[in-house]
Amino acid sequence: MSLNRLLIAKPWIWSFAATITVWIVTVLFTGGASSFGLSQAALTFAAFSVVVGIGQMFVITLGPGNIDLSVPATMTLSGTLALKLMDVQDGMIVVGLLASIGIGLIIGIGNYVLIKALRIPPIIATLSMSFIVQSVAIWSNRGLRIKPPETLASFATSSLFGIPNVALVALILSIIAWVLLEKSIYGRWISAIGQSTFAARMAGIPVDGTRLVTYMLCAVLASVCGYLLASFSGGAALNMGSEYLLMSIAVVVIGGTAVAGGNSNIPGIWGASLFMFLVVSMLNTYGFGAGFRLILTGLIIIAVILLAGGRQSLR
Amino acid sequence: MTKTLKREEVVAARGVRVTFGAVKALDGADLVIHAGECIGLVGHNGAGKSTIVNVINGGLTPHDGSLTYSGREIHGISAARANGVRCVFQELSLCPNLTVGENARIMHAELKGWTWRNRALSLVETQLKDIFPGHSIDCDSTVDDLSIAERQMVEIAISFAGIDKRPKLVILDEPTSSLDAGLAAQLMAYIRKFVGEGGSVLLISHILGEILSTSDRIVVMKDGRVVADRAASEFSTRSLVEAMGNVVREQEFSRSVAARAGDAVLSMPPRRGHGLAFQAWRGEMIGLAGLGGHGQTEALLDLYLDRNSNWWPKRQREIAFVAGDRGLNGTFPLWSILKNLSIASLGQLATNRMVDRAREETLGAGWKQRIEIRTPNMENRILSLSGGNQQKVLFARALATTASTVLMDDPMRGVDIGTKQEVYEILRSEAANGRTFIWYSTEMDEIRLCDRVYVFRDGAIAAELVGEEITEKNVLAASFHEGDAA
Amino acid sequence: MKLSSGTIRLIIPAASLVLLLAAVFYMQPRAMSYTGLNLLFNLAVPIALATIAQMLIMSVNDLDLSMGTFVSFCACVSATFLQSSPALGILIFLGAIATYALIGVVIYVRDLPSIVVTLGMSFVWGGIAVLILPSPGGTAPTWARWLMTAKPPLVPMAIVASILIAAVTHYIVMRSSFGVLMRGVGGNDRSVERAGWSVLGLRAATYALAGFFAVLAGIALVGLTTSADANIALRYTLLSIAGVILGGGQFVGGKVSPIGAVIGALTLTLAGSFLSFMRISPDWQIGAQGAILIVVLALRLALNRLEKREKSQ
């Protein structure tokens, strides 16, 4: 009974249970030899999903219809421009970071201006925005692959006490996001808006201001993620963000955030991100082809949401 | 009594028990409805009226007791419908994206074949004309484009309509909540006609005058049981209220003759370019009266939205709002009672934009006691409260702010008398402390509590009544056009 | 003359289409011919069918993020099984449509968010498509090829087919009893349920119908391109959603318009052709597409405002 209630109150437990299961299965299959390497790789790649996932989660919390499809384009543009600006010089690392944050801010504002000025659903506004951002990225990239500054690249690829640095960055960002969500007035506001925008307005919440900040936050997290990913993988590529479109949405929902808005949780994003990576690597270990891998990934997403999703009807 | 016993039983619920967790919603209630009678059902919020309605219309299977339709024991929504039970719910249940005719198609499965559109249209149009002669509803328009009163009229008409066979029992749950006096009278007249032709009606209303004048028999519920079941002629307003368990309190008229010091705290130019301007002074309780839907809510929204930025949070709240339609613009359903209460005053509960839980809990405990929110724990979900108590939370939300002006959008809609009295007390004491209240109400008793009243007509302010001028007669006179036949 | 609000909502997308078409004709007068129109709207038919499928899902307040991969899957089946052994191909399509109905049931029964379930399904369809056609190939069935390249007199095939699709779906969605019930589910499913209908059955039927139109989209696409690959229609997910919205449909509340959706699909197709006429550098093609989407939506807003002002007068 109390266990049941705990599972309903903390839906992210599901995603962690699934993660641990997949991890054990994979490690057992490889005879335990790869457990450290696997964990490190999982943490590294999950970190990128976590960073974009948190941003997407804030947006999804705003309620039905709120979603940011410009995440991959933002990641690409930020990675491309930041590397171009830094031009392999260590001294420019901070400038590059600030530039990519700036790009995020501009794209976030652009997104909300479109939503507000044209009164169109966010899904269409951010889609249109992503087309334009993607074009800017293509134009500025010109097929050249610029390497990240030496120090930045080694920071992004090394670890501290066995934990990858990018995972630590993601952890710090998660803690900040958690405080923001659970403790701050802003967190209350976005949850209120997600439950009923009109009621939030009548309770004195500056709805437009809050939503603008949220879209900016999401775009900034996406661009920081693009900056990190480009540094980690030794250069920006035009398609580097593409897999994060579906991934950012999938980790949020598998992690137990209500798609109907108003209710979000950050631990679940970690569980879901680790899970998504481990599933792919598990299928790789078993030697499945690309087709089977896709099918099983899809079926597992559906299975997880089937197992965890019943909570909504339980209330 | 002996006469009704001989009639056919349309629906009979005997010894019905329904529990939701620990709450006994129905505790052995009996309700028998015969053909050709109108039964008035009254009781507090939480007395079990909605639950027994849900049992009768098949939406809820009783945990104990028997439920028979025309003598046969069956369950389920479709079984109830097959036995001619129709229900008009308190919340409007039309599909807003469909036309009036298409809604009739959904409610009447018999409308089949190629010509269903024409038949559905004529069905609704005839029925609307029968109940509300002289209405001006276009049955080809989408429900979205209709006013709330028109939607309610359409829903009532669709429920009374019948193609092959007319409904045997129509349950009307607060059918006049959005209708003005003229339309309500038309509906009551139609109910009598329908009953005279052998149909039955179960009428639930907070307006006791309607219940007393329209029903043959009145059933009073309290705490999930039927406490009185007698002919309507044996009741008076006073005895009905007593049977519900409320002692009618004497109205105390402690109207403050407002000392108008300084400038008005709130003002608004004449609306739609005609009528009077709106002004409010500190400590006043101002009523917005008039027929429902004549621009009172819009005036409140304008007053509120003009003084509340949608982009920047304000340091000092100067105006707060109490919603009337809880589901639409009041409660946050996922949250606890406490979070629902504190949302408007987070600014004063926070240091460095972080909410201080301890201060929040103190605030919640204070208001729980002051406004008597009936819950064991403020951490419970807001939806665990009854409607009246949810409304109290919304009052507390507005009163807990530092706002000097509180706007109220008919907040007592569907609230029981006991709760009302408690809230009135608090409003009076807050007004005495210098708060300004602007109160739109559809109930005359509440308008009479105000210091000054603006009567709305056609979206603008038609008259201003002060002090002793506030009488039902004066309000009504200002609400109607001169020479109007209504 | 009195216009219903539904008709007024249709005028706006139609006007945007005409305006865009006028711009194309102005820049490239040669497009004003049978061949020119055929070229401009060449790819409109599969997009229109996919948009209709998406619109059906949206009419019950859901969203299908697997539309693109599903149409790709259908294209792969059309280019392989349907061509070599038609009976097996049809059987696979029936199974796919049944799967759609099942998804509709699961989403409703378990109260799941449609975007996540269809997100998962998009991986499944994509995976099956890769299994069927690991590399681009296959051949379109002759009849599909013939149908899509037919040259009716006066008006090009793409336009004839679009009008036909709009007419048929308008009848199903806006006029028939089933359409009313389906939109009723989108508008207020509780009252539909209270009136004694099975919301479950209605949603299953809606999903199945959407699956059917998506299958048609896959066949039409292969008829045009003659061969298929597993990624052939990935962009249809976003195109179909944008098409419904351009056509005046809404995400929630069962407010959809089949004629508008077809017009929206045509507008999107035209926007693609428009860009190649403008000789815009390939770098900016995608960006310009986004800009056109924004301009058309701004236009719609302006016209909407105008309509509202007239209404209040």
Image: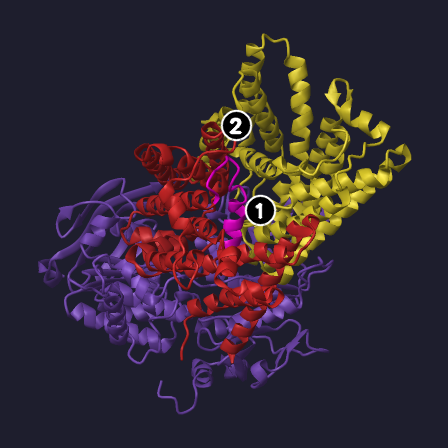
Chain colours: A yellow, B purple, C red
Q: Position of residue A40 (x, y in %)?
A: 69, 20
Q: Position of residue B49 (x, y in %)?
A: 32, 54
Q: Which residue is identified by label 1?
A: B338
Q: Looking at the image, which residue is at 58% across and 62% down?
A: C296
Q: How many marks?
A: 2
Q: Quadrant of the C terminus of chain A?
A: top left
Q: Is residue B168 left or right of residue C57?
A: left
In the rendered view, tell whether residue C263 sits above or below residue C307. above
In front of the other: C71 or C300: C71
Q: On the picture, is A183 further left or further right than B410?
A: right
Label 2 sits on a secondary structure element that is helix
The numbered dot on residue B287 is none
Q: For the residues carrying marks 2 and 1, which lies nearer the camera in this image?
A: 2
Both on one chain, marks 2 and 1? no
Callout 2 crowding tier (Cα within 10 Å): few <14, some 14–19, many ≥20? many
* Residue at image coords 21%, 60%: B113
